Image (cartoon, grey):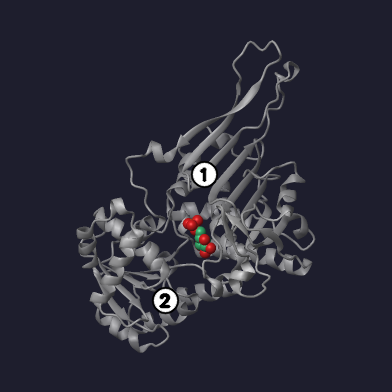
Amino acid sequence: MIGDKVSTLLLFGATGDLAHRMLLPALYGLHADELLPEGLRIVATARSTLDDASYRTTALKALGEHVPADFFDPKVAAAFAERLTYVALDATLPAGFSKLAEKIDPAAGLAIFLSTAPSLFEPTIAGLTSAGLTGDKVRLALEKPLGSDLASSREINDAVAAAFPEERTFRIDHYLGKETVQNLLALRFANSMFEPLWNSAHIDHVQISVAETVGLEGRTGYYDGAGALRDMVQNHMLQLLALVAMEPPADFDATEVRDEKVKVLRALRPITAADVGRHVVIGQYGAGTIEGEAVGGYADELGQASTTETFVALKAQVDNWRWAGVPFYLRTGKRLPERKTEIYIQFKCVPHSIFAKRGARTKANKLVISIQPDENIEFRVMAKTPGLDRDGLRLREVPLDIGLANAFADHRRRIAYERLLLDLIEGDPTLFVRRDEVEAQWQWIDGVRAAWTEAGLKPQRYSAGSWGPSAAEELTRCNGVEWHD
Ligand code: BG6
């Protein structure tokens, strides 16, 4: 399902934080590895009044700051900068778009990347349409947040659909661009040993954790209106859950993969006001210590009191044949003790232990898929402790460990946006989120929020540097499960 390569990449929000930290370094990486189409022009736009030369200077500065030093080559960067041109544009004013259109030939293939506030999506699409910058050879990529609930997400999707059909709409969830996330598919579907066990007969529960040490990072306007559930669970965590839980697609292809993911998202059991108290814990960090450094609380950073949650832990259920009765515990938060994204799969214990009478205890097997910062797959199995066993037989859990960074030491670690930008330029939507997925995600999330509003759930205080409110421990413990910290 790969389309034609485009000849122009048009970047909205080109002076923003994402462009500086991720998009320009990703494009530099692709350029350095000679993966960008020859002659691809990158037209950058933003509101600031800059000319080509000053934008190139800004871009080179961003590359110097954000590209790893051992990969940064000033000569390559200078050649990359030649691809950049800049057009100042206020997306709320239609007039500027005709100036943009003078610089671009959409018939030669155009990929547009909107890395702007969502309030600008609709005027930007209207401007592009009136300037003739849509059409068969034009694709559109959008960054989150795609709305703040199902209704606003539909509004954005409708506005997009008026100009771009679904097959040319590329909704970004940068987690799908991460190598280790794609590796989850390789682990499940390129090995024969896991899939027969990948179901409720053999799996006790699944945990998905995305822990961050950072706080608000100055994103007050956006984050305080969003909160952890909408910022992280609605998109990244539900995508991870869908990849863990989906049926094997027939092909690694945009339609097949997304068809299977959306079935999982639709099978998520709604959380109601009656069970939200037992299934959801929300928290907000207070002052504390992160990596030995004292940090303020959320309200201090924000400058006012707030009921926004910076932590959420919940128990989700996928109501289908494969997963009946298997809890999926999701947990994410800011200002937690370490940065860690991990999928933890606990299998069921053996049905009968032949070692019990000799004093040995067996533990359930576990599969720990570390996504970041470590890229690791670890399978924990039981082994006999060496010895003559005169005092009884001892079993111990030992890891079968695959450090992906070592196994693939000769491969450069790429940022997620390299993959996503190249797929956009080449027209492969497999790792982008389809409309029905994003709407199924919102539908479930809206239900959770409505339930907690009805039940009057309030964020509980946790100290920065802790693993969230103590109630989060209770959420799993009442089912005999401990979080894998
Ligand atoms: C973003 C969220 O989508 O993902 C941020 O808006 C969060 O709040 C970030 O910090 C985490 O991404 P990563 O790739 O650092 O895990």
* Circle on res. 86: none
Q: Residue at x 74, y 41 (%)?
A: 480
Q: Quadrant of residue 367?
A: top right
Q: Residue at x 20, y 63 (%)?
A: 79
Q: Position of residue 210 (x, y in %)?
A: 57, 53
Q: Nearer the viewer, residue 123 or 221?
A: 221
Say whether residue 322 is visible: no
For disc 2, the neighbor class at 10 Å (few under 14, some 14 to 19, many from 20) is: many
Q: Secondary structure at mark 1?
A: strand
Q: Nearer the viewer, residue 313 or 436?
A: 313
Q: What residue does disc 1 label?
A: 370
* Mark 1 C-beta to ligand 1 under 8 Å: no
State left or right for residue 307 relative to residue 214.
right
Q: What residue does disc 2 label?
A: 163
Q: Secondary structure at mark 2?
A: helix
Query: Which amino acid type corresponds to the residue marked 1 in the rendered image?
Result: Ser
Q: Position of residue 234 (x, y in %)?
A: 58, 62
Q: Position of residue 206 (x, y in %)?
A: 63, 44
* Sequence order check, earlier mark of 1 and 2: 2
Disc number lying in front (1 or 2):
1
Q: CA distance from mark 1 to mark 2?
A: 39 Å
User: Can you say whether 477 is above or below 51 in the image?
Assistant: above
Q: Residue at x 50, y 72 (%)?
A: 157
Query: Which amino acid type corresponds to the residue marked 2 in the rendered image?
Result: Ala
Q: Residue at x 47, y 46 (%)?
A: 250
Q: Position of residue 228 (x, y in %)?
A: 61, 63
